[in-house]
Image (cartoon, grey):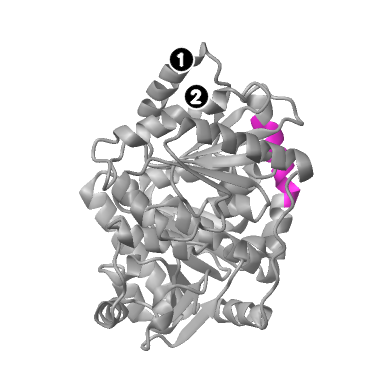
């Protein structure tokens, strides 16, 4: 089994190596790039993860699973590969050795999201520093989300000293940014800096989704007994079961979910609710909340859980809703889908929110007010009836194609 899992490192053709972080967002960010490189240049990718949960989520996510199967192979590392300490250490040693040989002999490239910054994988950086790229973990940037996160106690304002420390620790001579706001773009010790903006809307990714979205949706709707032409509402559910800084018991979050589902139950007979859960959300708590909602509404909530990509769900969504601002909203925003943020903020957090301009990806913001939530839902439906969803026109920036061509050339 050990050697069978490593057989892909003995392939004759040239490939690139992608070390994913322990969240789906890193794969989601890099997938359009690896797909474009494969379709334009025929270079395959080997994706590596240390997280068994991420492996399961990828296998369940038909869109990203298909991208991996088309462009390359997913390999599992460390304890995710085996619980036997001796086996996974031997496996890790063999992997690093084989990768080092490929880097030196085949001149292959590595893209990582932070894993090579630390040992033992930092050894690969020292083998071929000019062929190691560090990439941004998201395709979208929101100044609003960043400011709110900092004011909410998650992260801090970057100083010259903290940036210098991070830059000195980085294991890469090249940076790939998908938003143009990646902090490492400011590192003076980084030789090459590439910006690949709007990657989710490049021709190759758009064609891939256009060719497959209807099939994905059809299979999903058949599975849940829906008509093929059904419209839905997408409910993006975050870290259920994980307390927040201002909600250490998760009570307010659970209350917001309950109130959201009660209101959605009123329209769910005509517009079934597609619930898309975060990778680390507690499904048992979610099921318990849904049980209470059905008790309140006499089983009036028509819903189904989904693992489809947000860009696929946006194709059939009348609107999308969440209980916290998320960059996931941008997938719906750019598709022209109305979005509702139904928050669960306390007084201090609302004072912070009052000083910030609402993010462009949020159509309606409501905070723990069911009457206002009902009004926002009706307004979102009415806007859809008036003009349906018209995608936002994304203009290519000057020099963007040249920048992309330079990045792909550097990765070959």
Q: Residue furthest left?
A: 85
- CA neighbours of label 2 inside 10 A, class few (<14), some (14 to 19), many (20+): many
Query: Quadrant where the C terminus lies?
Result: bottom right
Q: Residues within 10 Å of mark 1 (few under 14, many from 20)?
A: few
Query: Looking at the rendering, which quadrant does residue 304 occupy?
Result: top right
As drawn, 151 above or below 173: above
For the residues bearing labels 2 and 1, Cβ distance under 8 angstroms: yes
Left or right: where does residue 198 sit relative to residue 186? right
Is residue 27 found left or right of 337 in the rendered image? left
**Circle 2 SS class:** helix
Of the pair 318 and 181, the residue shown nearer to us = 318
Residue 261's x, y, as percent? Answer: 49, 27
Query: Residue beneath label 2, please?
Result: 262
On screen, residue 240 versus residue 159, left or right, reads right
The picture quadrant where one finds residue 399 is bottom right
Q: Residue at x 39, y 77 (%)?
A: 184
Count the marks.
2
**Extent of the magenta region:** 210-220
Give the camera-side residue of 2 and 175. Answer: 175
Name the dominant secondary structure of the magenta segment.
helix
Residue 151, how many percent across, how many down?
31, 60
Q: Is residue 407 above or below residue 8?
A: below
Whether residue 190 appears in magenta in the rendering, the answer is: no
Q: Nearer the viewer, residue 197 or 68?
A: 197
Residue 374 image offset from top left, x and y in percent? 56, 31
Residue wearing tag 1: 296
State whether residue 90 is above or below residue 17: above
Q: Earlier in the sequence, mark 2 or mark 1?
A: 2
Whether 215 is among the magenta residues is: yes
Mark pair 2, 1: CA separation = 8 Å
């Amino acid at each position: 089994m050990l050697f069978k899992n490593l057989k892909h490192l003995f392939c004759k053709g040239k490939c690139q190596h992608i070390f994913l972080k322990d969240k789906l967002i890193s794969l989601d960010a890099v997938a359009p790039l690896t797909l474009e490189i494969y379709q334009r240049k025929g270079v395959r990718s080997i994706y590596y993860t240390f997280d068994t949960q991420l492996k399961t989520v990828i296998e369940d996510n038909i869109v990203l699973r298909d991208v991996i199967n088309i462009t390359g192979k997913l390999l599992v590392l460390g304890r995710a590969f085996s619980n036997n300490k001796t086996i996974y250490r031997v496996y890790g040693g063999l992997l690093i050795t084989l990768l080092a040989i490929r880097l030196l002999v085949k001149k292959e490239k590595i893209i990582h999201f932070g894993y090579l910054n630390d040992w033992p994988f930092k050894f690969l950086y020292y083998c071929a520093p000019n062929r190691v790229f560090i990439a941004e973990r998201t395709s979208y940037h929101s100044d609003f989300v960043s400011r709110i996160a900092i004011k909410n106690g998650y992260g801090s304002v970057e100083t010259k000293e903290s940036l210098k420390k991070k830059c000195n620790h980085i294991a890469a001579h090249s940076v790939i940014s998908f938003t143009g706001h990646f902090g490492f773009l400011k590192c003076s010790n980084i030789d090459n800096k590439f910006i690949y903006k709007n990657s989710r809307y490049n021709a190759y990714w758009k064609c891939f989704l256009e060719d497959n979205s209807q099939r994905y949706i059809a299979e999903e709707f058949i599975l849940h007994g829906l008509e093929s032409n059904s419209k839905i509402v997408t409910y993006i559910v975050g870290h259920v079961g994980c307390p927040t800084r201002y909600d250490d018991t998760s009570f307010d979050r659970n209350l917001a979910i309950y109130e959201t589902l009660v209101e959605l139950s009123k329209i769910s007979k005509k517009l079934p609710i597609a619930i898309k859960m975060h990778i680390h959300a507690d499904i048992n708590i979610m099921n318990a909340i849904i049980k209470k909602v059905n008790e309140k509404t006499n089983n009036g909530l028509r819903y189904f859980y989904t693992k489809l990509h947000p860009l696929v769900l946006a194709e059939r969504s009348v609107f999308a809703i969440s209980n916290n601002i998320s960059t996931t909203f941008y997938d719906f925003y750019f598709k022209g889908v109305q979005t509702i943020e139904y928050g669960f903020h306390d007084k201090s957090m609302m004072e912070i929110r009052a000083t910030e301009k609402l993010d462009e990806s949020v159509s309606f913001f409501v905070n723990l007010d069911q009457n206002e939530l009902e009004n926002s839902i009706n307004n979102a439906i009415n806007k859809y009836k008036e003009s349906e969803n018209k995608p936002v026109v994304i203009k290519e920036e000057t020099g963007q194609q040249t920048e992309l061509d330079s990045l792909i050339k550097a990765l070959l």
